[in-house]
Image (cartoon, grey):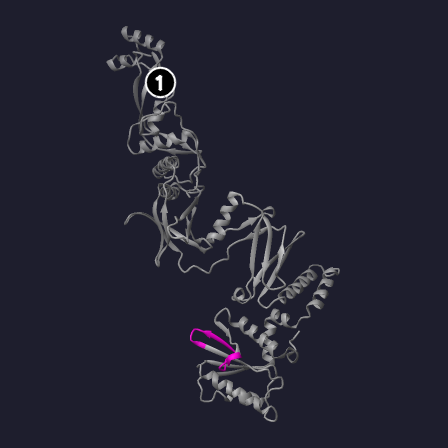
Amino acid sequence: MAVEWGRVGQPGFDRIVEALVHRMYDASARVEVVNGRGGDQGIDIKVTHGRRVRIFQLKYYLDGFPTTAHKGRRKSVKQSFTRAVQHQPSEWILVVPCTLSTAEREFVTSLAAGQAVRVEVWDRAKLDGLLAAHADLEASFTRDQLYEAATVYGQERALLMDGMRDVSARVRALGRQADGLDDHWTVDFARQGETVVQTLRAKHPRAHEVSPVRITLTGSGPLAPELAEAVRRSLGFGLPEEVVLPREAVESLTVSGPEWLSGVHRDVEVRWQPAQAGALVETAVEVVFFDGEHVTARYPGTLSHVGRGSAGRSVTVGLAGGSMELMIPAACGTQATLRFTFSLERLEPSAALRLLRIYQRIAAGGAFEVRANAGTIGGGELPSRLEAARQEADQLAGYLEDLAAVQRHCEQYFPVPAELTPTDRISLRMARLLIQGHCVISPFLPRARFTLTGQDSPALRALLSGEPHAIQSGTPTCAITVAGRTLDLGPVRSYHPRITVDEEDCRRALAALDTGRGDGCEVTVRPVDGECFRLLLQNTAPRNGWTPAPLELPGFPEPR
């Protein structure tokens, strides 16, 4: 439905053209509508794009400006052009709600003679075409809202005889009606069962300035700690996470803005998420830890988000297998907060170690910064975490280093197992020491038997004396099993610090040696206790009763 220009009057004509110019140029330029009460100096609308300036002159001449009538109109047009040229525009546009004759159009274009300005005319045909391209604007100025809304409602109740095509047609028709509610805002909608979801959408970049919408939430009581923290992160610092306030937490939601949108709503669930920021200019960053002026560690990362809220700003850095969220309060002297989340799942030991090293740096506390080529994006001073958390991280780092060393030696690479059993942990530590050339304590010495050859010696008699002794052995090949995988280590040497022999076997063996008939006599040896486990797994003195427990991965609290 085209605008009936003869019925809208001068104020309506001005309003339609102003809205149309805003829609066309807001995204790329600055649009200014001049109030002419104090004299418009030849400018009704000014559009500035860098150094280029367009000036629009609006004349509500329904029957043009012929020479046979309305002789003063051409003079008025020329005076408006002369005043506008003083502002050195690159383009001057005359807007009229009629169709100009050839003579009238030639008069307008002749104004540019000898001037460094381009002259153009937007007449009725031009305006109708532009409004057709922005149908929602046209609808907002031409609809009879009550009549059309009733018509659409009647269609919604009609039988959908043409199936899905009818459904699509009715939804589009309703969407066009929603677009016509306002020239700055519209509503997108969707049906999910018995629920209708409505999403407010701006029609142009300056909608929030020209026609602001304010939302006020009134709570029904204190929020749960987890929800309160989520609200603080999202609203306070602009982190890109959705927050859901359940119905029982919301007493009312008040919307203030255009009349059709304003109102008080109760018994509602509220969801919000900070608006997506524009594309980041630079994404390659470094997370730098330092002590005074000395940089102690650098880790590369990817800047994925920069946000701002009522309490401060936020920075999110992606790392291989993890994410670092930094919240920087706006108040001076307030400590920044860092939340580091990571998973070692499906990572090889070297990559898992890098993540764990970052965790250890954070847990140890101290200064850090997120740096890009353009400068520091954010940073702060971290408090030291609990000793238990640091010890747990140090212990896991040791096991990952063992696994990485064994994988390199055996040339078998696989992700960190989801669980390392006590046997796996001991095997890895032993294997790493063996491939580094050490002779290690064997925690797996079984109950074994050996046969005397008849050769008598002080060492053999000392072994058969019944006192605990050490035993040393070697093998040309050795293999361990970790997470169901067999890893071949090659030749190794090992010993057990305390072994003993069966007393009855000792008596028979000594008697056989005394009589010179020791050949073929068998002797059973076995470990005395679990001391080897403690000596193998730690460098400090063993703690009585300590037994290694299964180690779950990744399993760490988040530093805050």
Residue 167 in view: yes
- Relative to 154, is 502 above or below? above
Residue 296 appears at what percent x and percent y? 30, 46
- Relative to 399, is 271 above or below? below
Residue 502 appears at what percent x and percent y? 36, 12
Answer with the quarter of the image where residue 157 lies: bottom right
Q: Which residues are magenta?
A: 37-52
Q: Quadrant of the C terminus?
A: top left
Instruction: Spot the residue most to the left.
Output: 458
Answer with the quarter of the image where residue 512 lies: top left
Residue 82 appears at what percent x and percent y? 48, 86
Q: Which residue is mark 1?
A: 528
- In the foreground, 124 or 419: 124
- Relative to 256, is 388 above or below? above
Q: How crowded is the residue under tag 1: few (<14 C-alpha within 10 Å), some, or many (20+)?
A: some
Q: Is residue 51 magenta?
A: yes
Residue 402 appears at what percent x and percent y? 35, 36
The residue shown at (34%, 25%) is 542
Q: Quadrant of the N terminus?
A: bottom right
